[in-house]
Amino acid sequence: MPDLIKPTVADAVLDHIGAGADLIVPIANGEPVTLLDAIERNAERLSGVRVHQMHALRDRPYLHAAFGDRLRHMSYFLSHVTRPRFAAGQVDLVPNHFSEVYPLLRRRCRNPLVIAAVSPPDRHGYFSLGTGADYVASFIGRARFFVEANARMPRTFGRNQLHLSQVVGWVRSDVPLVEVEPVQPGDVDRKIASWVAERIPDGATVQTGIGAIPNAILASLGNHRALGIHTELLSDGVIDLIESGVVTGARKRNNRTKTVGTFMLGTQRLYDFVADNPAIELWPATYVNDPRRIAAEPNFVSINATVEVDLAGQCASETIAGRYYSSSGGQADFARGAMYSEGGQAFVVCRSTADAGRISKIVPSFAPGTIVTTLKNTVDKVVTEWGVAELRGASLRERATALIAVAHPDHRDRLRHEGRRLGYL
């Protein structure tokens, strides 16, 4: 083998990082821990370097502005790690739709270096991006790669492989993957799930996320048949549905018989399940989240959570009390695609209250600083434990009436009063 494709030491990555460089890092467990350790260790050699990443899972000194402007984080979706750092002004946040992160990076970054955790090379000389494809897979063959072959990274299928000849360097590592235990749903979550599950037909293709309500929805689909999965995020909840034969993908139009996602996050059970499993495919977000691709799938069902819904039907899913909590992700991608799918449905789910019932999640209008994630014209069905508000094609009066009906009874009188004041009722 030429020296170029033999493993090297982590510090060698510094030879490929010049002044003002842009480093692109995959989402979640795609982060190359050993390489970023080396970069931080040699931060005095850097100047104006930017690290572009969605949803970082590991806290690091550079996220706290430890190296000043020499090394700064550009977030495309805040996590529990980067959220406080953004609030402190130590990291930047770039608004985006997940489907468009790759073209945004192409536009912003000149000659970027992708640094990624990958599976060890197979006997053919191919790495896989393991737990993801996200925006990074789109750079294969179009940008420089320096990768970290993690012995614990599962080898996965889809459009997320790159060959030894396509990297400028690589190292070996043995780093445990971050695990996220499934959130156990409560009675309210299960009630919301029941409203959604009864509206999902057999043979539908489903997208859902992670959290108590999505977990409850997946758990409630055990009596369905021939479901397909085409989703941004693969979590533990899909395993039982695949193993029981509920999810087969047999009626999908695209990637028939395959369960498709763009990244995964869960427990070791999930990472073991997907390893060398040809029924699971990871594709770039430019494919998975493309509203046009989603729209081409009949009976597509999109399920996403929100923080607040106003009486016009706007959904605010990325801010809490006027402060940034996450970002848009793929919510609008899937809601828009499901709208144009033949027989498609887009559910936005939330509990009706917060703070032990004192705060209504259905509000007359948003407070200053609240960011609208999904436009009123796109929102289809809003679901709380009190029922389903059907908004597609509804007038403002009909929308407000339907949303008040799924608000908590303790808050309905105030919402009616405010609805009349706003001219909706």
Image (cartoon, helix red, strand yellow):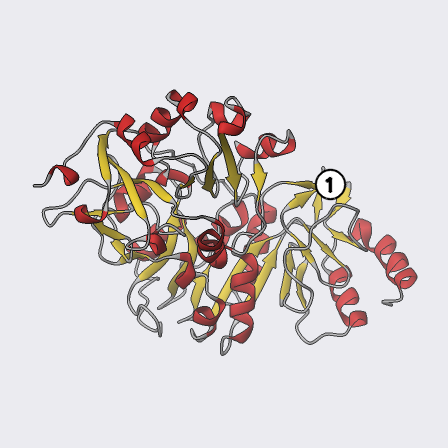
Q: Position of residue 275 (x, y in %)?
A: 23, 46
- Residue at (52%, 41%) from the top-left corner? 75
Q: Is residue 201 visible?
A: no
Q: Residue furthest bottom?
A: 342
Which residue is outermost to the front?
19
Q: Is residue 216 above or below residue 229?
A: above
Query: In the rendered view, would you say 36 is above or below 394?
Result: above
Q: Is residue 38 left or right of residue 48?
A: left
Can you say which quadrant of the picture contains the C terminus?
bottom right
Q: Residue furthest left?
A: 1
The residue closer to the viewer here, 28 or 214, is 28
| Circle 1 residues within 10 Å: few <14, some 14–19, many ≥20 | few
Secondary structure under the numbered disc 1 in the rendered image: loop
Give the percent coordinates (x, y) of residue 186: 56, 43
Is 140 positioned to the left or the right of 195 in the image?
left
Rendered-image quadrant of the N terminus: top left
* Residue 381 in the image, given as x and y percentages of width and height: 63, 65
Nearer-the-camera pick, 234 or 163: 163
At x 35% / y 72%, what residue is drawn?
Answer: 252
Compared across the picture, whether 6 is left or right of 135 comes to: left
Amino acid type, label 1: Ala
Q: Foreground: 28 or 115?
A: 115
The percent coordinates of residue 412 (x first, y second) are 82, 55
Please report the residue visible at 66 percent of the width from the left and 48 percent of the height from the top: 307
Q: What residue lies at 84% left-to-right and 56% top-to-bottom?
A: 415
Label total for image: 1
Q: Is residue 397 visible?
A: yes
Q: In screen coordinates, is 171 left or right of 186?
A: left
**What residue would you read off at disc 1?**
321
